[in-house]
Image (spheres, helix red, strand yellow):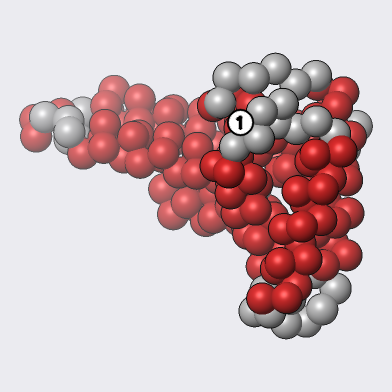
Amino acid sequence: MQKLLAKAIDELKKTNRIKGVDFSKKLKKLIELYNERKDFDVFQSHVLDDVADKFADLFKQLQQERKSFEGLGIDFEEKAFYDILKAVAEKYKFEYPEEKLIVLSQEIKKIVDSNARYTDAFKRDDIKATLKVDLILTLDKHGYPPVPKDEVFKEIFEQAENFKKYLSV
């Protein structure tokens, strides 16, 4: 079950890096919890049942995450940009309206899609530079973030490049 869950998380990371990393941390914590059990508990059924239940719960959470875009009115890929924009806003403690996050995530995905149409897009510096400029201009047009910080742009670029990399595979 651990391998199946790890594989599903790796697939999520290809589209939604930030949520994939979150789930990787949860899986790692669960594995550490299992590995820290007492030797005499190894074969007790309640320990194995508890671990199996926790793996199943994590798998259910992962399935719910894969469907979470439906309630927002955006697609799965747009949700990846929505998640990074929301996470950055929380990390740097600034408010940004939900409706604007949705619109901005849709525009960012369009930009990434248009830049990823080239087969070697991930390797060409000129295309990466165009992507960065387009993203900065779009973010600025939408007032995101309210106070410009290079770290904010860096995290969004990482998600865009991650998405673009696996889009072309």
Disc 1 packing (10 Å; few <14; some 14–19; many ≥20): some
- Residue beneath the point at 73% across and 76% down: 126
Where residue 64 appears, x then y in whole percent?
68, 31
- List x then y, in percent, for residue 68: 75, 31
Q: For the residue labelled by badge 1, is the local secondary structure a helix, a strand or a loop?
A: helix
- The quarter holding residue 61 reads top right
Q: Is residue 78 left or right of residue 161?
A: right
Give the percent coordinates (x, y) of residue 115. 82, 67
- Outermost residue on the bottom side: it is 120
Percent of width and height locating residue 86: 67, 29
Q: Is residue 47 left or right of residue 23?
A: left
Number of residue marks: 1
Q: In percent of the image, x 54 and y 55: which residue is there?
A: 10
- Side of 6 relative to 32 (left or right): right
Who's the residue at 33% across and 34% down the image?
29
Quadrant containing the C terminus is bottom right
Q: Is residue 5 left or right of residue 155?
A: left
Nearer the observer, 108 or 12: 108
Residue 70 vs 11, above or below: the answer is above
Between 123 and 68, the one lying in front of the other is 123
Depicted 168 relative to depicted 103: above or below: below
Q: Quadrant of residue 130?
A: bottom right
Is 3 placed above or below 54 here? below
Q: Is residue 18 visible?
A: no
Residue at image mark 1: 87
Kindly identify the residue that appears in the image at 9 percent across and 34 percent down.
Answer: 39
Badge 1 amino acid? Ala
Residue in front for this viewpoint, 30 or 156: 156
